[in-house]
Image (tube, rainbow, N blue to C red):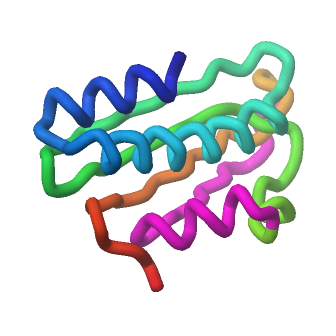
Amino acid sequence: MLRTTVESTALVADANDDDAAELGLIVEEVAHGLVDAATEDSMLDCTLSCTGHAARVRLAATIRSDLHKDRHAVGWQIVDALTRDTRVIRSSFDPARHGYPTEVDFDWQPGASAA
């Protein structure tokens, strides 16, 4: 459902079908990584601001482990190839939330890759 929402938002912001699908794929990959590592009561938060020319995305969740160890997986390689300035920010362990509050932020522009 998140991917569909992101794609619809991108289309409303004047992205074409292919660009909207690309942004949806990127968000889905990041969300998948966060959800797989999430603590039991964690919620996934997604903030998206976009125009037809660019998007800024922030996904956040409380996770049980370090997300960086998965950064060599194929899904993360896709994210890194299609985005600019991907940042993973992990806060200190929060005992009340039983995990590490973690944010993944990135900038995306149609047709522009990090390579």
- Number of labelled discs? 0
Q: Residue furthest bottom?
A: 115
> Is 58 situated above or below 110?
above
**x, y percent for residue 47:** 38, 33
Name the image quarter holding residue 44. top right
> Is 78 situated above or below 96?
below
**x, y percent for residue 102:** 64, 44
Residue name at image x 53 percent, y 16 percent: 1
Tell me if residue 71 is in the magenta stretch: no
**x, y percent for residue 26:** 52, 49
Left or right relative to 48: residue 51: left
Residue name at image x 81 percent, y 63 percent: 73
Residue name at image x 34 percent, y 47 percent: 18
Residue 60 or residue 20, whichever sits in front: 20
Residue name at image x 71 percent, y 37 percent: 32
Range covered by the magenta-colored residues: 73-95
